[in-house]
C-alpha cells in the first residue's frame, strides 16, 4: 500500500483505525512511504498524527460509553474488579495529575502499549479530554515526527537502525517508566 497513489489516504485510515482497534502501527506503512519520497516525510507524519488523534478521540469515547453499556453484562466479580481499578485510578489521577500526564505522554510515545489501549482506558477512567489529547499529541507527535526526521535525514541506514532497535527502545521506555513509578511510590 505504501507505493499506491492513494497511499496517504491509506496511511490516514490506518492511523485512525489503529488508535481504536487495529493491531498494526502506522509507522509500518509510513516508513516505506518516507523512504520512497523523503521530501514528503513530514507531510506523511502530519497525516498520521492528525488522523491518529481523531481515532484516539473515538477510542476514548468508545472506552467511556462502551464500558458503561457493557458493564451490566459482566459478572458481578468482574465488574467489581474493574470498578475498583477505575476508582483507584481516578483517585490517583486527582491526587497526582502531573504524574498521570507524564504516564500518558510516555504511553503515547512508546510502541509496546498500543494507542488503542491507552485511548479506551482513558475513556473508562474519565481522564479530562483536553489533557488527554495534549498528552496523545506530544507522545504520538514525537514518535511520528522523529521517525520522519530520521528517515528524511538519515535515509535507509537510519530506518534500518530504527527497525532493529525499536523493540529495545520500547522496552527501555517501559523499564524507565516502571522505575519512575516505583521510585515515586517509594519516596512518597
Image: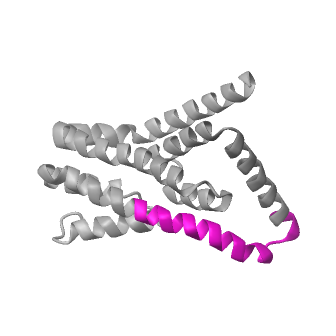
Name the spot of residue 64 as percent of width and height, x first.
63, 67
Q: Quadrant of residue 176?
A: top right
With 159 as the anchor, is 71 left or right in this view?
A: right
Q: Who is closer to the viewer here, 172 or 45?
A: 45
With 146 as the anchor, is 156 left or right in this view?
A: left
Q: Residue at x 74, y 55 (%)?
A: 86
Residue 188 part of the magenta segment: no
Quick one: quadrant of the N terminus?
bottom left
Q: Residue at x 64, y 72 (%)?
A: 65
Quick one: quadrant of the C terminus?
top right
**In the image, which residues are magenta?**
53-78
With 141 as the anchor, is 92 left or right in this view?
A: right
Q: Residue at x 21, y 55 (%)?
A: 43
Name the spot of residue 137 as percent of width and height, x first.
41, 50
Q: Who is closer to the viewer here, 93 or 183?
A: 93
Note whether 75 is above or below 99 in the view shown: below
Note whether 46 is above or below 13 in the view shown: above
Residue 57 part of the magenta segment: yes
Q: Who is closer to the viewer here, 41 or 154?
A: 41
Q: Quadrant of residue 52?
A: bottom left
What main secondary structure does the magenta stretch of the protein show? Answer: helix
Is residue 41 at least partly visible in the picture? yes
Name the spot of residue 66 as percent of width and height, x first.
64, 73
Name the spot of residue 128 as percent of width and height, x first.
59, 54
Amino acid at each position: 500500500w505504501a507505493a499506491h497513489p492513494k497511499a496517504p489516504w491509506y496511511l490516514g485510515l490506518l492511523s485512525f483505525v489503529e488508535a481504536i482497534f487495529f493491531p498494526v502501527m502506522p509507522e509500518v506503512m509510513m516508513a516505506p512511504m518516507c523512504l520512497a519520497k523523503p521530501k514528503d516525510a513530514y507531510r506523511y507524519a502530519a497525516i498520521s498524527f492528525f488522523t491518529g488523534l481523531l481515532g484516539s478521540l473515538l477510542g476514548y469515547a468508545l472506552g467511556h460509553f462502551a464500558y458503561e453499556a457493557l458493564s451490566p453484562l459482566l459478572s458481578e466479580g468482574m465488574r467489581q474488579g474493574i470498578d475498583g481499578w477505575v476508582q483507584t485510578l481516578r483517585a490517583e489521577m486527582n491526587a497526582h495529575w502531573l504524574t498521570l500526564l507524564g504516564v500518558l505522554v510516555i504511553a503515547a510515545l512508546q510502541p509496546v502499549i498500543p494507542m488503542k489501549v491507552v485511548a479506551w482506558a482513558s475513556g473508562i477512567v474519565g481522564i479530562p479530554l483536553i489533557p488527554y489529547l495534549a498528552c496523545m499529541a506530544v507522545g504520538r507527535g514525537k514518535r511520528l515526527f522523529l521517525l520522519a526526521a530520521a528517515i528524511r535525514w538519515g535515509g535507509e541506514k537510519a530506518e534500518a537502525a530504527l527497525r532493529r532497535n525499536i523493540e529495545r527502545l520500547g522496552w527501555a521506555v517501559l523499564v524507565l517508566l516502571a522505575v519512575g513509578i516505583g521510585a515515586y511510590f517509594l519516596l512518597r
